[in-house]
Amino acid sequence: MAPARGDLGVLRAHNRRVILNHLRRLGPVSRTQLVELTGLSSASITGITAELMGDRLLTERSVGEAGSSGGRRPILLDIDYTAHYAVGLKLREDRIMAVLTDLSTAVLAHVTEPLDGHDPHEVASQIARLCKALSRRARIDPTHVIGIGIGLSGVIDALQGNVVHAPLLGWRNVPLAPLVRERTGLPTHIDNDVNSLAAAERLFGHGKHSAHFLTVALGRGLGSALVLGGELHRGRRGGAGEFGHNVVVPDGRPCSCGRRGCLEAYTSEPALLSQFQERHPDLAPQITTVNELVTLAEGGHDGAASLLADAGRLLGTHLSYLVNTLDPELIVIGGEGTRLGPLFFDPLREAVRARAFDGLADDLPVVIDAWSDDDFTPWARGAASLAVQCAFDFGTLAEGAGMTHLR
Ligand SMILES: [Zn+2]
């Protein structure tokens, strides 16, 4: 019996994504290689790749000159990263950083603005204005924008596009994605900003070949995103990965979450700066930024250097707990806090290795994805990845997103 028409549609969508994901991971390959890689028949590969080329998602290229034997140049297929676009926005309580990217999340235009206010309708309207401004700035056809991704700090219900709780914006249960979708007509995806960084790492970054990895974001706060079995693990309410709020000192230093003694309150950038200023009041007027603190430490100031080392060791110890729990292939650390340098990260790596159980971390790469100073582009690119990943994902987020361009 022939499969029902609906089943064929699902099967075709699945096979399109199988092909796109092979090309995303491996780069250009021939049709013959695709047959071997996917197990699909060559007739299927020919049909589906023709369809993907018609949708401007695939492109053909002939590579290199003909060999000395004078044979035909091989035709390779690659994703056409340049024919579709995404908008990514990092939302902070005081400003919005927005980028327009191609399908590889390469930035074509960017703009940063103060946030007009915290009223969700105003924020949605500002986002809609920014999307138009970015299309004009990049001189692209706005009908080729496949979607919008928004990353912000807080607990997010990504499936519903709902901000469950964003303390810095004072939001509870704000349906941000539907509000933006109403104004732009574009599929809109929101997620916790650390999850958006993990989306970028998973698609085109260090996590491209890993099924199990942790992305840690260190800066004003501390959080993590867990990719397990190739999927982002969100937990019951979207709160998975909030290890920065593990209590390390009961009734200890105040934390941004309103409680006391969290790991973040000892290891985030503001926490390091305030601890230093409390311990060295004589230097407090001079050392007012994290860069100044790091420079002082690297110049040989014992108090500054030991503060960084102790904090790095503490964070490394907590990462070792995550290693014992999840046994990842890779840890990627990003965020503004990557500027803390080797005085912080060497003890961190040492603690991960020394404290993980029975060699679990012996050959575990801990990659520091260094950011330039006060550069919010990686956050916004991460947010764009939330839209781009719909072209590649099989799950409900992709299916439910109304990706008319990408079927
Ligand atoms: Zn906390």
Image (cartoon, rainbow, N blue to C red):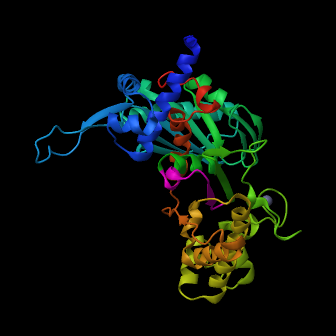
Residue 339, percent across and down?
A: 54, 69
> Is 325 situated above or below 363?
above
Residue 208 in magenta stretch:
yes
Residue at the extreme front of the image, as rendered: 1
Q: Which residue is drawn at 58% across and 33% down?
A: 394
Q: In which image quadrant can residue 29 be found? A: top left
Whether residue 207 is visible, yes or no, is yes
Relative to 322, is 36 above or below? above
The quadrant of the rendered image in which ligand 1 is seen is: bottom right
Number of marks in the rendered image: 0
Query: Which residue is pictured at 49% across the width and 28% down the height?
Result: 15
Q: In this view, does 330 lie to the left or right of 204?
A: right
Task: Please check the rendered image and state whether residue 130 is part of the magenta-colored stretch, yes or no.
Answer: no
In which quadrant is the N terminus drawn? Answer: top right
Q: Where is residue 303 in the image (x, y as percent from the top left)?
A: 66, 86
Q: Which of 373 and 156 is in front in this view?
A: 156
Give the quarter of the image for residue 137: top left
Residue displayed at 14% across by 40% down: 71
Q: What stretch is highlighted in magenta?
A: 205-220
Indicate the position of residue 344 as horizontal and vertical percent values: 61, 76
Most foreground residue, 84 or 37: 37
Q: Percent position (x, y) of residue 170?
A: 76, 44
Q: Can residue 137 be seen in this view?
A: no
Residue 313 placement, left or right of 172:
left
Res 74 → quadrant: top left
